[in-house]
Amino acid sequence: MSFWYETERLPDNAGDRLQTTLQIWRCYILWSRRRVIIAVPSLLALATFGTSIMFAVQYARNNPSAILKASLIVVSLSMATNIIVTVLIT
């Protein structure tokens, strides 16, 4: 598969990043605009974005072991971000 096949999923990735950003914003508003509260979720969201870029690069290089590692990291970071923000919102 080529790199361009993976770029077809970019709208999904962008939608996921937008959803995460909106969840963090909602948490920020609900916690009276305290930046300390959103520090960890924001860092996790940035790490997820950076790792997604690394995943796309490894996918383009067709490196199966690096693709697996990067995808596990992306999923783990994304889940951690969503769990933390959901707990903070509820």
Image (cartoon, helix red, strand yellow):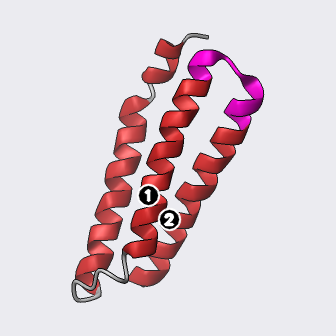
- Pointer 1 residue: 45
**Mark 2 belongs to which amino acid?**
Thr
Q: Report which quarter residue 27 is drawn in.
A: bottom left
Depth check, front residue: 24 or 44? 44
- Looking at the image, the residue that sits furthest to the bottom is 32
Mark 2 neighbour density, 10 Å: few (under 14) some (14–19) many (20 or more): many
- Pointer 2 residue: 81
- Looking at the image, the residue that sits furthest to the top is 2
Mark 1 neighbour density, 10 Å: few (under 14) some (14–19) many (20 or more): many
Q: Report which quarter residue 76 is drawn in.
A: bottom right
Q: Which residues are magenta?
A: 59-68
Q: Secondary structure at mark 1?
A: helix
Which residue corresponds to the image point at 56% horizontal and 10% vertical from the top-left? 2
Q: Measured from the top left, where is residue 42 in percent x and y?
A: 39, 65
Is 83 placed above or below 66 here?
below
Q: Specify whether 69 is left or right of 41.
A: right
Q: Specify whether 28 is left or right of 55.
A: left
Proximity of marks 2 and 1: CB atoms separated by less than 8 Å? yes
Which residue corresponds to the image point at 40% horizontal and 30% vertical from the top-left? 10
Q: Measured from the top left, where is residue 79 in percent x and y?
A: 57, 60
- The quadrant of the rendering that contains the N terminus is top right
Is 49 placed above or below 53 here?
below
- Looking at the image, the residue that sits furthest to the right is 65
**Mark 1 belongs to which amino acid?**
Ala
Q: Report if residue 74 lies within the magenta region.
A: no
Q: Measured from the top left, where is residue 90 in percent x and y?
A: 42, 85
